[in-house]
Image: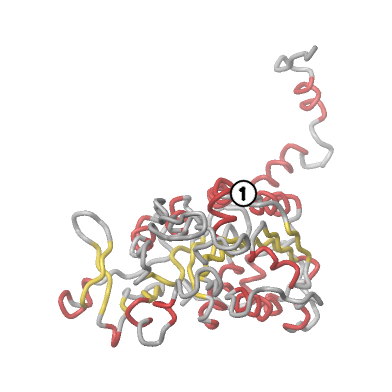
């Protein structure tokens, strides 16, 4: 379900052009640390960890050139369980710290692991600006629609009316749609997947790792203790055909039993809606273009997600486009300021320090 044809590990190296590759054959065991994995039984984090440990060897990178940065939350234990470099950082600030690494160390593959509370509440500002700048990061956003680590408060993705320890009469907030938020910030790679679909999860993560720029993958992830069953509609074999709207680049958006359902665009409002294919014909269906430079269509598709009961939701790669990255451009500016000889512009620096834009503090 990738948006474009991906040749595999070679493109991953292209996406991380400055990261040294490994000449050694690596396996999943090479990426498993000696730390005991401590999440609740049945937590979706286990599946994501196993998927990441499984495909990292295929990237052909040196483990010492891979860094996982996390914030605070259940998902933020992730770096402990990978035998790479990692940092358990500050609540909501993982994208900021990862940005510094990406700019100063082009030899690193930098990942951010975060949750819906960490990324979209206290960390919302850092997340949208990382996306806006197109920093060369891969962001995994675990969305369980609850605060799990602090034992069950509502989060920025909890549905309106959600009864929790912090909202005993029901939440009055309108929840974020993380994919819509990322597309609104014009993220260059935006995707959504599900923890229980190992094949799709791995495929989307491979594509995200291959992308040069900011990749963000929202992962619907079950919290069996404080919000169990939040995504059952997409996991139950009897309902998932009618609820998972699969996105495949270059193909009509069609789903449901025997492909009976599809998505069309309203000619007046421009919004997307689900229809019976038999009523409109296949020619009326939207053909998904993840490579479109304008994110408007991808955004319209993201709005098909029901923010309340989550009875239908598009799954796959919404947008995958190539644009200059912030860290590449910043390094180019530094190189220009230093001059081709690398000696630096000492006269310009002296003029700045001795200029008129100064003041004296008594």
Percent across and percent down for residue 234 are 41, 77
How many numbered discs sit on the rendered protein? 1
Looking at the rendering, which quadrant does residue 152 occupy? bottom right
- For label 1, the SS is helix
Q: Residue furthest left?
A: 279
Q: Is residue 173 above or below residue 13?
A: above
Percent across and percent down for residue 144 are 52, 67
- As rendered, which of 120 and 299 lies closer to the eye? 120
Badge 1: how crowded within 10 Å, few (<14), some, or many (20+)? many
Percent across and percent down for residue 83 are 78, 73
Looking at the rendering, which quadrant does residue 138 occupy? bottom right
Quarter of the image containing the C terminus?
Answer: top right
Percent across and percent down for residue 98 are 69, 54
| Residue sitting at x 53%, y 71% | 221
- As rendered, which of 123 and 357 lies closer to the eye? 123
- As rendered, which of 170 and 155 lies closer to the eye? 170
Determine which residue is flagged by label 1: 326
């Amino acid at each position: 379900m990738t948006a474009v044809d991906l040749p595999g590990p070679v493109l991953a190296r292209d996406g991380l052009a400055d990261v040294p590759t490994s000449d050694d054959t690596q396996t999943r065991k090479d990426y498993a640390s000696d730390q005991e994995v401590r999440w609740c039984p049945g937590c979706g984090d286990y599946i994501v960890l196993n998927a990441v440990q499984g495909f990292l060897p295929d990237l052909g990178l040196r483990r010492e050139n891979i860094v996982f940065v996390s914030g605070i939350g259940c998902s933020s234990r992730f770096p402990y369980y990978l035998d790479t470099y990692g940092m358990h950082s500050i609540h909501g600030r993982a994208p900021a710290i990862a940005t510094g690494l990406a700019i100063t160390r082009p030899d690193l593959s930098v990942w951010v692991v975060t949750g819906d509370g960490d990324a979209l509440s206290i960390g919302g500002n850092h997340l949208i600006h990382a996306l806006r700048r197109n920093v060369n990061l891969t962001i995994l956003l675990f969305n369980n629609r609850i605060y799990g680590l602090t034992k069950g408060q509502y989060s920025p993705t909890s549905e309106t009316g959600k009864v929790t320890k912090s909202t005993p009469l029901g939440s009055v907030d309108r929840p974020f749609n993380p994919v819509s938020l990322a597309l609104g910030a014009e993220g260059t790679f935006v995707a959504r997947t599900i923890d229980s679909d190992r094949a799709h999860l791995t495929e989307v993560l491979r594509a995200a790792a291959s992308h040069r720029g900011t990749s963000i993958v929202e992962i619907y992830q079950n919290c069996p203790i404080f919000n169990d069953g939040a995504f059952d509609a997409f996991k139950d074999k009897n309902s998932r055909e009618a609820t998972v709207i699969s996105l495949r680049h270059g193909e009509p958006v069609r789903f449901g039993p025997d492909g009976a359902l599809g998505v069309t665009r309203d000619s007046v409002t421009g919004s997307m809606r689900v229809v019976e294919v038999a009523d409109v014909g296949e020619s009326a269906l939207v053909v998904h273009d993840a490579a479109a430079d304008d994110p408007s269509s991808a955004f319209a598709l993201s709005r098909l997600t029901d923010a309340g009961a989550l009875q239908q939701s598009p799954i796959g790669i919404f947008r995958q486009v190539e644009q200059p990255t912030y860290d590449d451009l910043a390094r180019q500016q530094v190189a220009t300021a230093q001059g081709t000889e690398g000696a630096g512009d000492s006269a310009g620096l002296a003029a700045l320090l001795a200029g008129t834009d100064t003041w004296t503090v008594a």
